[in-house]
Amino acid sequence: MKRWRWSLWAVLLVVAGWSLAGFYGFGDPETQFARILMADGGLKVLRQRDSAWSQAQLRWQQRRVAAGYERFLKQHPDHARAMTAYGCFLYDEHREPEAVQMWERAISTDPGLAVAYNNLGEHLSHCGQVPTALTYFDKARALAPDTAVFHYNWATVCALFRRDAQRVYGWDDAEVFRRSLIAFRRARELDPQNYQYASAYAGTFLLMRQPDWEEAHAAWRFCLGIPTEEAERQFTYGRLSRISMRLGRYDEAHQWLEQMTVDEVSSMRDVLRRKLTDLQAAAGDATESTARPPHPPQSPPQQAQRLAVR
């Protein structure tokens, strides 16, 4: 029995060795790098599984991928894209300082690698170093202006941390929002089927003091043309109902409310219904007061009579 166990372990070690050899050594550098990226991508699936077997697979695969990156970079020390990818792997493994060092190394190796600047910007924005993060996002956008996520990330940080953006660029609130809208819209144009980008553009209007409600309405209507989950679609109905009220289109607002049928948006729907009822009641009172005939003017003798009675 013991001999069988030792034989099994020997076979497993040999198979693992063959696997690692194929993982590292066969093909040109780009083919090897592609294999590592493929294995790295498989980790995301394993992380979502809770079984003991899946977790054991995950730990083994994590060691395998890390060893793959290390060996590849030892053989190809100037491969900046591999450094960037390895940094992402380390970040997912909660090894942030090592990830940052890898991204900085990638930039020093290839100053034109936009994704490394973007990754550093994301990390720094999460750490509260917003001004520096914005400069990294600016660099990423300048190097790769046709990459949607770079515009989205920059605009998100600007809109959320407006005071920092004002200190960096010298803009007031209105200008920060205007520039953020431009960047969000650019991201939407580059990836028009991305609901996150489209809804970020549309949602920014709701943060402004004096938004263009017609453009906000058009932006949320655009979101309806993007395939997405039903809950997000229902959320969009709610936003359109709210904006329709702002525009005084109460019948349209009611129509959007009627389409909000799932439990996830029930509280939002109830609030909007009450608001619509109040607005319609106020509009009805205003209409009635303007439609009521004015009091006939009193003649001077009548006025004198009333004064005499007092």
Image (cartoon, helix red, strand yellow):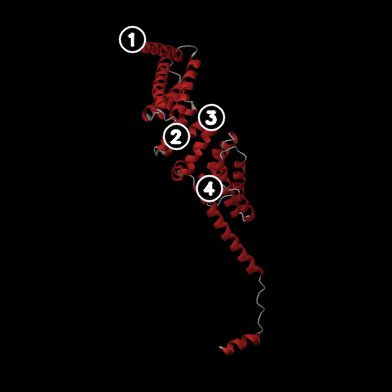
User: For mark 4, what is the residue?
Assistant: 265
Instruction: Give the structural element (helix, strand or loop) at label 3.
Output: loop
> Please, what is the three-letter code of the amino acid marked with disc 3?
Ala
Mark 3 highlights which residue? 144
Mark number for residue 36? none
Secondary structure at badge 4 equals helix
Could you classify mark 3 by the number of other residues whose Cα lies within 10 Å: few (under 14), some (14-19), or many (20 or more)? some
| Residue matched to label 2 | 122
Q: Nearer the viewer, mark 3 or mark 4?
A: 4
Residue at 50% across, 13% down: 28
Of badges 1 and 2, nearer the viewer stands 1
Q: Nearer the viewer, mark 3 or mark 2?
A: 2
Residue farthest to the front?
A: 1
Residue 286, relative to residue 309: is it above or below?
Answer: above
- C-alpha distance separating marks 1 and 2: 53 Å
Which mark is first along the chain, 2 or 4? 2
The residue singled out by tag 1 in the image is 3
Considering depth in this image, is 265 or 164 the residue closer to the camera? 265
Q: Residues within 10 Å of mark 1 (few under 14, many from 20)?
A: few
Q: Amino acid at mark 2?
A: Glu
